Image (spheres, grey):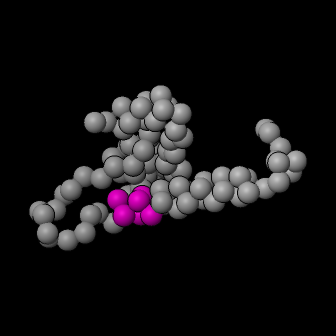
């Protein structure tokens, strides 16, 4: 399965797909390794070490941390909105 397929499936099932917040480091000129494989639709990592030899690349770990924070922020926003009184929620 590809990220494109999963995003399409999510849309067909009326789910929300959350993409990454930061552009890839090769576009921004950064050397932090954020989204180093250019997965614009989601996040991905490439195992560049033999199994059991250690952690993934530091940039991949930073990408995962940022993506997790983005999902947590969206989840909190939706939870706060769903708990707000109906007359206090504005549709925009």
Q: Position of residue 16 (x, y in %)?
A: 54, 40
In the figure, is residue 85 to the left or right of 62? right
Q: Position of residue 15 (x, y in %)?
A: 52, 38
Viewer-nearest residue: 47 or 78: 78
Asked whether the viewer can see residue 26, the reply is: no
Above or below: residue 8 compared with residue 20: above
Asked whether the viewer can see residue 87, the reply is: yes
Instruction: Tell me how many marks there are.
Output: 0
Residue positioned 73% across, 53% down in the render: 81
Viewer-nearest residue: 34 or 72: 72
The residue at the far right in this view is 87
The residue at the far left in this view is 50
Residue positioned 46% across, 35% down in the render: 10
In the figure, is residue 48 to the left or right of 72? left
Magenta stretch, main secondary structure class: helix
Q: Position of residue 35 (x, y in %)?
A: 40, 51
What residue range appears in magenta?
A: 59-65
Residue positioned 25% across, 52% down in the render: 46
Quarter in which the N terminus is drawn: top left
Quarter in which the C terminus is drawn: top right
* Magenta highlight on residue 18: no
Q: Position of residue 67 (x, y in %)?
A: 47, 56
In the figure, is residue 60 to the left or right of 24? left
Residue positioned 21% across, 56% down in the render: 47
């Amino acid at each position: 399965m590809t990220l494109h397929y999963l995003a399409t499936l999510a849309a067909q099932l009326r789910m929300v797909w959350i993409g990454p917040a930061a552009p890839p480091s090769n576009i921004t000129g950064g050397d932090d390794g954020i989204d180093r494989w250019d997965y614009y639709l989601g996040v991905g990592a490439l195992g560049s070490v033999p199994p059991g030899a250690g952690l993934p690349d530091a940039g991949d770990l930073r990408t995962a941390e940022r993506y997790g924070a983005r999902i947590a922020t969206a989840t909190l926003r939706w939870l706060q909105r769903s708990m707000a009184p109906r007359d206090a929620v504005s549709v925009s």
